Structure formats: C-alpha cells, structure tokens
C-alpha cells in the first residue's frame, strides 16, 4: 500500500468510527466514547501517514508528528505549512494536537454526557467531541489535497 492510500484508509476508518450509531442501551455512552477515542487514534495514525507521504521526497527516517511539527523540526515547505496551522489555536491541526495529548493522558479525551459528575456543573457538551472531530476531518481533507499538490511538485 502506498503512503497516500494508507492516509486515505486511516481517514476513512476514522470517519466510519464517528458514524457508528451509539444505540440506546446501557452501553450506548461507552460505545460513543470508544468510537470517539478510536477515531481520534485513527486520526493520529493518519497524520503520521500524511507526514510520511508529503515528506517522502526528503527521505526522512522518522515521521513522528511531535518531532516533525516541532518548531525545530525539519525545514520543508509542507512541514512549515503545517507548523503554521499549529500556531493558530482555532485551526483543525492545533485542535487535534491538543486532543492527541489528552488521548495519551490518563484521563483520556472522551467524556460522559449524562449526569454531572458528583455535584459538578457540566459546561458545554462532551458529545461535541464527535462533532469537533468530524469538522477537523473535513478541514484536514481540504488541507491534504493542497499539501499533496505541493509535495508532487518535488
């Protein structure tokens, strides 16, 4: 499988996870949370696959997003473009990276929606994670198209 095909496959799998119906039984909320975190994990894999894909011409040995998107990372046009997105807190990539950090933390990223936890007031909707990920996927797909064109010029 080519890096491009793998990136597409992982993005599609993330979309499938987000489209999985939760149901209405006692496990519905746990299923939703699992689908959201699973989709986010797929998205992280897709980002690394994308980085491999658009830096193929540079022959890099590693494609970890933490290294490549760090300010001191490799100086390539595609990476500079992505670093610019990371600097904009409202961008799809900045939002995703913060979610990736939470995913790897002990608390995770998905939250329950029903019933505030022991007297805490719920602010916002935890179910919005799925919506946020869908928005990020759509924006990422647009960006990926442009990144691929830049990379193909090499």
Image: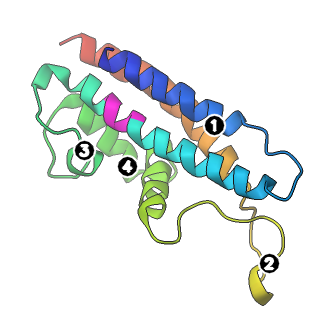
Above or below for 123 versus 21: below
Above or below for 149 versus 18: above
Dot 2 or dot 3: first in sequence order is 3
Q: Label 1 belongs to which residue? A: 17
Who's the residue at 14% across and 19% down the image?
57
Give the side of residue 59 with respect to residue 141, left or right: left
Q: Label 3 belongs to which residue? A: 64
Tag 3's secondary structure? loop
Who's the residue at 48% across and 59% down the image?
103
Task: Tell me if mark 1 has few (under 14), some (14-19) or many (20+) residues whose alpha carbon lies within 10 angstroms of its own.
Answer: many
Extreme bottom residue here? Answer: 119
Where residue 26 appears, as percent x and y from the top left, is 85, 59
Magenta stretch: residue 149 in it? no
Dot 1 or dot 3: first in sequence order is 1
Task: Tell me if mark 4 has few (under 14), some (14-19) or many (20+) residues whose alpha carbon lies within 10 angstroms of its own.
Answer: many
Circle 1 or circle 3, nearest the eye:
1
Circle 1 or circle 2, nearest the eye:
1
- Cα distance between the residues tagged 2 and 3: 37 Å
Q: Secondary structure of the magenta portion, mostly?
A: helix
Q: Is residue 122 visible?
A: yes
Q: Label 2 belongs to which residue? A: 116
Q: Is residue 120 visible?
A: no
Q: Label 4 belongs to which residue? A: 86
Residue range in magenta is 46-50
């Amino acid at each position: 499988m080519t890096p491009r095909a793998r990136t597409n496959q992982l993005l599609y799998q993330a979309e499938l996870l987000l489209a999985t119906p939760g149901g209405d039984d006692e496990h519905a909320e746990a299923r939703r949370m699992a689908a959201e975190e699973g989709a986010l994990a797929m998205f992280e894999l897709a980002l690394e696959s994308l980085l491999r894909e658009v830096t193929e011409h540079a022959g890099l040995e590693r494609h970890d997003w933490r290294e490549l998107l760090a300010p001191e990372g490799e100086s390539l046009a595609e990476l500079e473009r992505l670093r610019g997105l990371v600097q904009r807190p409202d961008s799809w990539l900045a939002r995703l990276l913060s979610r990736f950090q939470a995913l790897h933390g002990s608390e995770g990223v998905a939250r329950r929606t029903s019933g505030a936890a022991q007297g805490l007031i719920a602010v916002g909707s935890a179910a919005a994670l799925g919506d946020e990920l869908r928005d990020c996927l759509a924006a990422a797909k647009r960006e990926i198209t442009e990144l691929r064109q830049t990379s193909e010029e090499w």
